[in-house]
Amino acid sequence: MSNTAVGTVYDTIISEVINAVHVDFEENGVDDGALEDLKKTWQHKLSQMKVAQFPWDPKPEPMAQSAPAPTPTPAPTTAPPAAAPPNAPAATTAYTQSTLSPQSSAQSLSLPATLLPNSNAMAVKPEPAFAQVEPGIKQEPGLPPVHQGYNPTNGARPTAAQRAALALENQYGQRAAASINAIHSGIASQPPNPTAQAQQVPRQGQVPQHMNPQHMNPQHMNSQHMNPQHMNPQHMNSQHMNPQHMNQQHMNHQQQYRQGVAAAIQQQMQQQMPRPRPPNGLPAAQLDGSADTLEGGSSQAISDSNEPAVMSRAQIDEHLHAQLAARAKQMEGGGLMLPLKKAAKGRGAVAKRQSADGPAQFDGLDDDIKSEEDDEDAINSDLDDPDDVGEDDEDDDETMGHMMLCMYDKVQRVKNKWKCILKDGVLTVNGKEYVFHKATGEYEW
Amino acid sequence: MASSATNYYDLYRHGSLGVALTDALDELIGDERIDPQLAMKVLTQFDRVIAETLQEKVKARLTFKGSLDTYRFCDEVWTFLIRNVTFKLDNNSQTVQADKVKIVSCSSKKTDEK
């Protein structure tokens, strides 16, 4: 006897039974489809028991093939988030929100100007630039941006300077004359000289615009990426001040203040710029931390690439919503379940005290014996008696787990020694099935 | 235990093959595709076929040893509960161990007589 023989034997039995009952099915007016279904269901259920390898079962090879199949799926799942990065529209809307904010701070001196040019740049660039994302990425990741910023060949500089001068004139008229003159003189005389240009930057309130598209992009990009994920306008406001407010509140101060601070700022910028990553990395890492559960590597990839990503507000809202839902689930799973258990235990304790007074004194003893898990269901003490459950389980094991069904030829007993000759049996042991024609057993009682 | 119609035991219905057949028949009955009477006919055919097949097609031999926990003889049916059983399979000298095995055995005489 062997386990391999079982399959063929059972197959023979099944086909014989099906053949034998075919006539009965016809007599009862049942179509052959039912008979075929009976056979299939029979075989299927037998296969589910996994007691042997059956001829109608597929060979074990498919199991090995199914393993690699799931691997392709993770790739598509990570791809969509990467393909749908934060976008320019979101950045511009965030910017408009920030313009409404009256907040202003001297601490963000170097930052306010970054918003305007970048937002402009984003508003103008992204749609064409997004189609060719690669150049935009390549320009920024490395350390070279510092030198790019001072590159005299950059065509954006005069335009931005002129724009700055116009803005100053429009807003402040005569009061800004000095600044405008400085800008114009800067345009006229200084662009050819990179160092002079750099020195001019902090002096002129609007001039940092020149630098921003090159210098500040890494930071700005990151904040753009972070912002859509968290949809926090406050964050945007605090980081990027509206230049207009800046000008209104600080114009007077800036003229003197910046003169004095110019050197310091420039030093600071130069110190920061050569390694734009660390300052970016910190906030990005912190803010990405919360998003890691959902987007994980994709968001990281986005911030790394500084890609001018495009994502509609609806998409962002969906992301945020999903994130919040996941968080809420986590909170429910971790936070609420425990209190429930504790509360249940507390209730159980109360029940014990009550039962001690009332007629259910017998339960009091049981409760002491029972494990704490049973306290929740202490009301149904009879049904939950652990001894009964254990016995039931044993019976189930005996009948379901290991069983031999057979005929006996002879059963002999000499004192406590038993000897029996069995035949035509089916044996189920350790989840496997065996058939035998004859079996002899010897055991002591 | 003997089935009145065909004089075959229905104890094999409790094996995996019989359980699978019973479940399949129950499904068909639940879907009202067959009558319960027809299902009973299928089961009696199964009793006969499995008894004959085990008798004629299976040649394997088996010996086992263990300690008898419980024995019962009722209505010509022996029921043993054996602990720490070791089965020896003759044709490939393979051994199978089990903590406990329940043996339900009907008399072979009855089927032979009729």
Image (tube, rainbow, N blue to C red):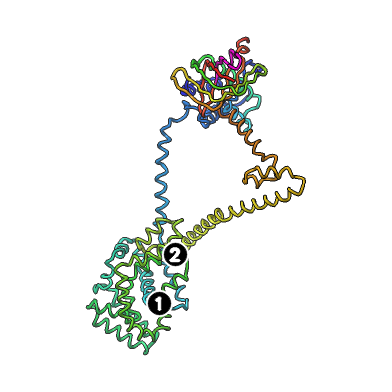
Taking depth in this image into account, of A441 and A230 the one nearest to the observer is A441
Q: Identify residue for label 1.
A: A107
Q: Amino acid at mark 2?
A: Pro
User: Is residue A16 highlighted in magenta?
Assistant: no
Q: Residue A242 vs residue A196: left or right?
A: right
- Pinpoint residue B17: horizontal percent, then vertical percent: 55, 25
* Residues rendered magenta in the picture: A407-425
Mark 2: few, some, or many residues within 10 Å (few <14, many ≥20)?
Answer: many
B68, A424: nearer the viewer = B68
Q: Secondary structure at mark 2?
A: helix
The residue singled out by tag 2 in the image is A228
Number of marks in the image? 2
Instruction: Specify the quadrant of the image occupied by residue A143.
Output: bottom left
List the single residue furthest toward the left.
A192
Is A408 contained in the magenta span? yes
Can residue B24 be seen in the rendering of this structure?
A: no
